[in-house]
Amino acid sequence: IKDKQICDDIAAEAIGRAEKAQAQREALSNILHQGPFRPGQLFELMKEQLITPLVDRHTFINRVAAAADVSPMGIYKTGFWSDHWTYIMDLLESYLLIHPDGEEHLLFDQLLPYFFSPASVRPRSEK
């Protein structure tokens, strides 16, 4: 989360504004502001630093996700599942089973993030 004030606000909402919670508040704000993280990493760092939110995890992570920037990441050779056409089709079909009227919105009204892989598949003629 790039805006430090937003990090401070989220930390205050999660930890409370009591003087005795200042160290936890500052630690949480710093974690949120330091750079990219996945939800599991965030909760693990909080556990390591003995940061205990007053709100439930669901409420907390929803607040964090609403303020965070999306940063698509992948690591070469561990699999880029979104590069597999059949996997993408399975995701679309599953989505449309749940939201049958959402096809047009999903395909034309959304800006979707994309991970640009450093790897590529050579044409069959070059193998």
Image (tube, rainbow, N blue to C red):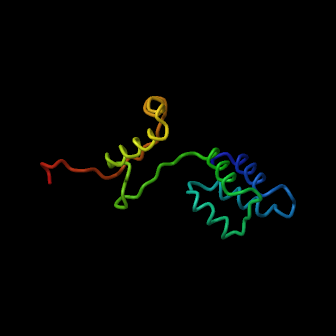
For the residue pair 59 and 6, the one nearer the viewer reads as 59
Query: In screen coordinates, is 108 left or right of 12?
Result: left
Tell me: residue 41, above or below residue 97.
below
Q: Quadrant of the C terminus?
A: bottom left
The quadrant where residue 53 appears:
bottom right
Residue with the most extreme right position? 19
Q: Which residue: 54% across, 46% down?
A: 70
User: Could you tell me residue 71's position as x and y percent?
Assistant: 51, 48
Residue 104, by quadrant, is top left
Percent x, y of residue 31? 65, 59
The residue sitting at 86% across, 64% down in the picture is: 20
Q: Is residue 67 above or below residue 39?
A: above
Whether residue 71 sits left or right of residue 49 in the image: it is left
Q: Residue at x 72, y 62 (%)?
A: 27
Of residue 91 and residue 83, the one placed in the foreground of this image is 91
Q: Measuring from the top left, give residue 101's x and y in whole percent.
A: 48, 31
Asked whether 59 or 22 is in front, the reply is 59
Q: Position of residue 33 (x, y in %)?
A: 65, 53
Residue at 37 percent across and 53 percent down: it is: 80
